[in-house]
Image: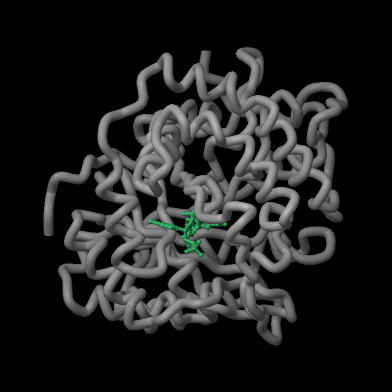
Amino acid sequence: MCTNLETRHLRGLGRSVSALGAGCWTIGGPATNRGVPIGWDHVDSGRAFAGLLHAHDLGVTLYDTADVYGLGRSERLLGRLLSLVRRSDLVISSKVGYLASAAHPYADGQMRRQLECTLANLGTNYLDVYFFHSTDFGEGDQYLPGAIKQMRALVEHGLVRAVGMRAPHTFALEWATGPSHERCTHEAARFLHLYEEIRPDVLTVRHNLLSPLYTPDETDVFDLAESQGVGVIIKQALGQGVLLGTHCPDRMRAFRQGDHRRQDPMFTPEALHEVHHGLASVREHFGEAVSDLARVALRYALARDPAAPVLVGFRDAEQINTTITSLGEALTTAEITWLHQLLAPLRDAFTARMAKSHAPCPSVRRLPSGMGAPTIKE
Ligand SMILES: NC(=O)c1ccc[n+]([C@@H]2O[C@H](COP(=O)([O-])OP(=O)(O)OC[C@H]3O[C@@H](n4cnc5c(N)ncnc54)[C@H](OP(=O)(O)O)[C@@H]3O)[C@@H](O)[C@H]2O)c1
């Protein structure tokens, strides 16, 4: 294993991990769950496994998977890597909550059964982080107290070291706790409610060049997590590939059955066109090779929180090699400011596009006014 890759101290877990982690969603390949496409097409498991081996050779120590990625295929591929290396050298996260089953994924006893399946797939006897993948806890959150209890029992039995949950794509504490706010109040209040109930150790957050920026008066999810010693793992730093210039309008790709991008608003021809044109000056300034754009995307994400590792998805050894070896020098403050200003119109258009595509959460609850807000970092 090469040891040149930078490391970060992941809060919440209290472990050092490689600054770039291997996101293992893609390598699960195409899949559908409850009739919805949830995978990635054109994935060859031999090539995907070679990618995992190469990630390990490059010094990657953080690997993120889920029961639902390829309906177990991703976990099993990762299990093949684990059979060849020392388990304790790696940090492995998996997730529960989306896989269709007879019972609700969070029904009594179901999480333990699902975890046993995950551990068997991975060939290990514990997870470093186990995420509540879905925030659907049934009608009126009927499964929420039981799910929290089950998760705590998994921790007590030594099967899980840290508890994770996902953060919404846009969030500011003030939207959730202040008087009715025009921006995402319901989604923010819902997240804060679950966050207070679950008290996670680690959050996953989507953060990339197109993510919204917040005013100095707003406490975003990174500030909230840092103020409470909660770890953050960044996902989708490459914008699922669209920030690498590989989806240009003259090379539009058709996504086959089982690929989630068939239904993703980010992958419509209009959205891809918008991003491609919006990034023209970035290509001009930093270079247009995939490695140039990967460096900008990854360095931008890594700059947000010095303790947050960034996951990168990949389908083979060539992709993971390009992204990891592209890391190079950090971006300067001036470059980050320039990117903030340059990309404002694209960021706003993207945020609006994503907001339009998300129906409001059906089980939203406003917080009772007396509910204590988490400590805010000064
Ligand atoms: N907790 C959660 O709810 C959650 C949600 C989403 C993701 N995640 C985690 O975060 C990880 C990362 O997110 P992500 O995989 O969605 O997106 P990502 O890392 O932003 O993008 C990954 C995709 O970019 C393309 N790509 C990567 N390297 C490339 C290269 N060198 N050249 C050309 N294309 C390249 C590949 O797609 P193509 O080859 O098809 O273009 C690859 O699948 C996931 O794998 C998963 O582990 C977690």
Look at 60% across and 45% down and name the residue there: 167
- Residue 283 lies left or right of residue 376; in this view the side is left
Which is more toward the observer, 64 or 115?
64
Q: Is residue 231 visible?
A: no
Note whether 204 is above or below 73 in the view shown: above
- Whole-percent x and y of residue 160? 40, 63
Look at 54% across and 44% down and name the residue there: 205
Look at 77% across and 44% down and name the residue there: 353
Q: Residue furthest bottom?
A: 102
User: In which quadrant of the rendered view does residue 218 lie?
Assistant: top right
Q: Residue furthest left?
A: 2
Q: Is residue 88 visible?
A: yes
- Residue 59 lies left or right of residue 230; in this view the side is left
User: In which quadrant of the rendered view does residue 126 lie?
Assistant: bottom left
Note whether 86 is above or below 273 in the view shown: below
Which is more toward the observer, 283 or 242?
283
Look at 65% across and 44% down and name the residue there: 168
- Whole-percent x and y of residue 331? 36, 26
